[in-house]
Amino acid sequence: MERNAAFAEVFERLKALFSPVASAMVVSSDSATSYYLDTPLKRKDGKRICFGGVEIGKAYVSFHLMSVYALPDQLKRISPALRKRMHGKSCFNFTEVDETLFAELGALTKSGAEKFLDRKYLESMGVRFQ
């Protein structure tokens, strides 16, 4: 399979991981190569809190999940295999579909959304709202 086609498949599969939580979020980017979700909550500066996204790059497809960075309990639950895909504090890179790791990311996405949509929880973490 050609790299562009493989990356497009990886992108669509990773994008689908956001489907269960997308209706509660605000889409900030939606194109053939980039998809990002923000929470509906606005911080004190008026900006929405980024929840996550997926983006096709030159060398890999990146899955960003801010709850992994912001919620230490999520980071503790990441498998060694998924941790190997981690780049930085909230990004996971893929060049092909990995059913096991995608299932793990799906579970992390759902659990992270619950906390990222809970205003009281975010306030307890120091986030200030309008």
Image (spheres, rainbow, N blue to C red):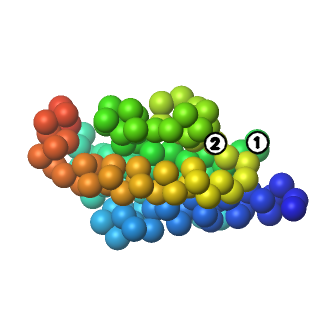
Residue 59 at x, y percent in the picture: 76, 42
User: What is the x, y in percent for residue 35?
Assistant: 53, 58
Three-letter code, disc 2? Asn
Q: Residue furthest right?
A: 2
Q: Nearer the viewer, mark 1 or mark 2?
A: 2
Q: Residue at x 45, y 45 (%)?
A: 65
Q: Tell me the SS state at disc 2.
A: strand
Q: Position of residue 114 (x, y in %)?
A: 26, 55
* Image label count: 2
Height in image: 121 above or below 4? above
Tell me whether circle 1 and circle 2 mark residues in contact (CB < 8 Å): yes
Whether residue 130 is visible: no
Q: Which residue is mark 2?
A: 93
Q: Quadrant of residue 75?
A: top left
Residue 110 position, x and y percent, is: 36, 57
Relative horizontal placement of residue 16, taking residue 127 as reference (left or right): right
Q: Which residue is mark 1?
A: 59
Please tell me which of labels 1 and 2 falls first in the chain: 1
Q: Is residue 100 left or right of residue 110?
A: right
Residue at 45% from the left image edge and 62% from the top image edge: 18
**Location of residue 14 by image quarter:** bottom right
Quadrant position of the N terminus in the picture: bottom right
In the image, 16 versus 45, the foreground residue is 16
Q: Quadrant of residue 69?
A: top left
76 w.r.t. 60: above or below: above
What residue is shown at x 57% (from left), y 50% (from top)? 101
The secondary element bearing badge 1 is classed as: loop
**Is the residue 20 above or below the residue 107 in the image?**
below
